[in-house]
Image (cartoon, coloured by chain):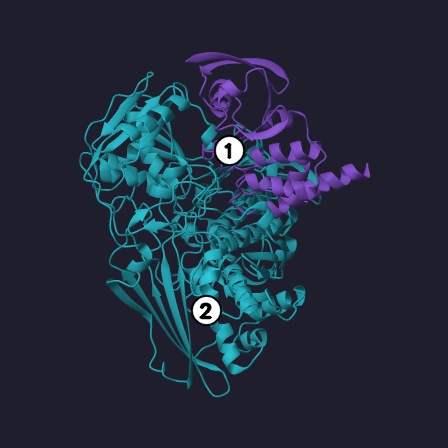
Chain colours: A purple, B cyan
Amino acid sequence: MIQNVKFTLNGKDTCVDGPASMPLLFALRGFLDLKGTRLGCGEGHCGACTVTLDGVPVTSCNLPLSAIAGKSVGTIEGILAGDHPLVTALLGHQAGQCGYCLPGILTRASTMIDAGESVDAIRAGLDANLCRCGAHGRIMAAISDVISKRTVS
Amino acid sequence: MINLFIPPPLQAFPMVSDWLSFKPDGGVLLLSGRVELGQGIATALIQIAADELDVGMDTIKLIQGHSEISPAEGPTVGSLSITFGGQSIRLATSAARSLMLETAAGLLQTTSNALTVQAGNILKDGLETGLSYGSLSQSVDLVVSAMDHARPKAAADRRMTGIAVPRVDLAARLRADYLLHDMVLEGMFHGRVVQPPSLTSIADEVPEPKNGATLVRDGQFISVVAKDEYTALCEANRLAAEIKWLNVKVGESHPIDCLDGTIAESETLYDSDELNAGITEVSVTLTKPIISHASIGPSCAIAQWEGDDLTVWAHSQNVFALKTSLARVLKHPAAKITVIFAPGAGCYGHNSSDDVALDAALMARGAGRPVRALWQRQDEFLHAPLSPAMKTRMTARLNSEGRILSFDAHVISPPHSTRPAGLQEPNLRAQQFLSLPMPMGPGNDAPQPQGGADRNAVPGYAIPAVRIVRDRPAVVPYRSSAMRGLGAFTNVIALESLIESCAEVAGRDAISYRLEHLDDPRAVAVIETVRDMARLQPATDGIGFGLGYARYKNSAGYLACIARVVVEDEVRVTDVWSAGDVGEAINPDGTINQIEGGIVQAISWALKEEVHFSGGQNLTQSWADYPILKFSEVPRMVTKLIGPQDAGPLGAGEISSGPAGAAVVNAVRNALGVVPHRLPLSRHALVAMMS
């Protein structure tokens, strides 16, 4: 059944028409022209499609539209537009190779940083995000940088 | 004239104009057949050109892997993109600079030696002359031999290479308009393939797709095309569930058992009459399972037919071979096919990126509109080419002083390449399922000294007598092909394991023992450096250090790694120290990123990865079946490059798989006092080792 789903997307009221079972990821990429969120496995295993739902990182490839009605969704586009310090830190550390996993990692890590989580907690949290090129060390260095600067200020 | 090495791509494409052109606004159009797979090659190639031309990196637009525009350099493989592709660009751009200065000197009635270039402007005595690359762009003929004019800068005069430069593409990769996966053509639909369960299977009844989706079918090639991606996915999955497949035949033999079965072909690559020299025999056998590319992004391609003209966008490693392979399978003139590289997710070898390009071309032809095809995660595990299972047995014979006098390696493996090879052997998966099916070709292994399965089976140690034998098993119940380093991963681990065993027998310290068997000072230097970097401690219960060393292909970069592991229920790698010599590093930060990425990948292979089979049936369908190294499992890493910047570049992208794998395996051996002989070193394998 096609359903009209109203929700908040990167702070703006949004509505989208689609089957209630359609995962949010396909609505973002196909109907809302937000392609920064990536399709990896479609099963919630790899984290490439991570977004935030009411401020909590979740995978969007297995999150049906019916579950987001009335809620607030954040995507990588929102994080880039908000100039999150982790974006600058990741580029500063050249923390990536192919970058396919990076929007999902940035989304989860920046949300956890903003929630005041520790480096260790973020590292454990990022076990939900796979990186195949092996940029983990640089990504963690960038996260540590942001957190230590925040602690100082 | 200096005697310059002419890299093979420049021999094939000798004209300056094959590699670059200038625009009136001063912009430089740089052409390369090498493609950006996430390894940072685009940045390094632009650095080289900027250095030779004396222009800013941002004035250079690089076109990579365009079948009609780029020099057809062949595949982006083998850590050769700088040594061959980059050096070609260095010579061609230096020739372009010389040609520009010769013309400018004529106009200014001076000599080119009196002229310099700054940001594309031609200066005399440090003052502007009004001439620039832009102003001369229409009057200088670049259709001339690059080698007749090449005057590459001396190492000491280089400004833009040998320094850490941010990747030109990394920021763009965070956004939605860079990857092929995000590209949209006017009127483009989305497609998904329904993969037949076996090569022999026949679909009995294929239901019609619903919700506006259409079926595109040719024989047993079955696909669904729809306006939106989710509909294509749902309908393809519905068909996959509802189609009744007949004649599904799966082999009975497990891929690992096939290594001990009938041998189809045995080749002795090196031989010696002195193999019986020595009195003490030491042997090591290592079996490596099948490994998946396991890229985070599934393979994607977009195809568009305009009349008889087909354009395909693909993240292929070799658009030139893909073009001729498509021509053969589609029975369509190659002259009417254009293949354009567009970046995808990380590529570590021959994955399904070429397969999906044929799928897209078939779907676009059937649907009569542009189609974006994407594989599913399970298809990647089940149907993409896989890094083959292999077994290496190595034997050394030592004299009474413990010195190795002879060495014998026996490598049993399917070929490490079944890449698309154009007209003879297109090797695109869907070709087997068409109404007029074409069987896949057998593939081949690169000959020595590069080697395929036997890559790095030849020891880099000074051993007087060496024999190398490579056997190909008769039964290979899966698609074997190239993945980062080919046989080097297994062979380097086996060799470094053997060296440790020999040192033990000889009663020597394993590091000194290696140094005594090395006569290449650059090899000695990386081992001595990494020994000094690591805070080595004697092995204690469950904690061990291990060294791994190799010069990749015995001709590319040198790398020595030391790993520290803690072995409890599972193996945890806590630290890896590395020292490398890649000769000239164009972008040292990028080189270290590649080396460390390769280390993480090798640890993941060594500890966790195996594509599981039951008989000949692949059971691996999702990440749940195929765990890879996670953030919490990645070690601390320290990496030093010690190579001379004035030496030639040796290649770096694949040099760490073998040494890192060997360091981990030797560290586990030292922690437990048992020599591992089967990868991965999973919890299950540890229990088996200790019992």
Residue B655 point in image, percent of width and height: 51, 58
- The residue under the point 58% across, 73% down is B511
- The residue under the point 59% across, 50% down is B634
Q: Spatial distance from mark 1 to mark 2, Cα to Cα?
A: 57 Å
Q: Amino acid at mark 2?
A: Leu
Q: Compared to A139, does B459 lie above or below?
A: below
* Residue matched to label 1: B138
Q: Nearer the viewer, residue B77 or B664?
A: B664
Residue B321 point in image, percent of width and height: 33, 43
Q: Nearer the viewer, residue B140 or B567?
A: B567
Chain letter behind tag 2: B
Q: Residue furthest right?
A: A153
Residue B118 visible from this viewpoint: no
Q: Nearer the viewer, residue B644 or B360?
A: B360
Q: Residue furthest bottom?
A: B400
Residue B433 point in image, percent of width and height: 23, 37
SS at badge 1 = loop
* Residue matched to label 2: B495
Q: Residues within 10 Å of mark 2 (few under 14, many from 20)?
A: many
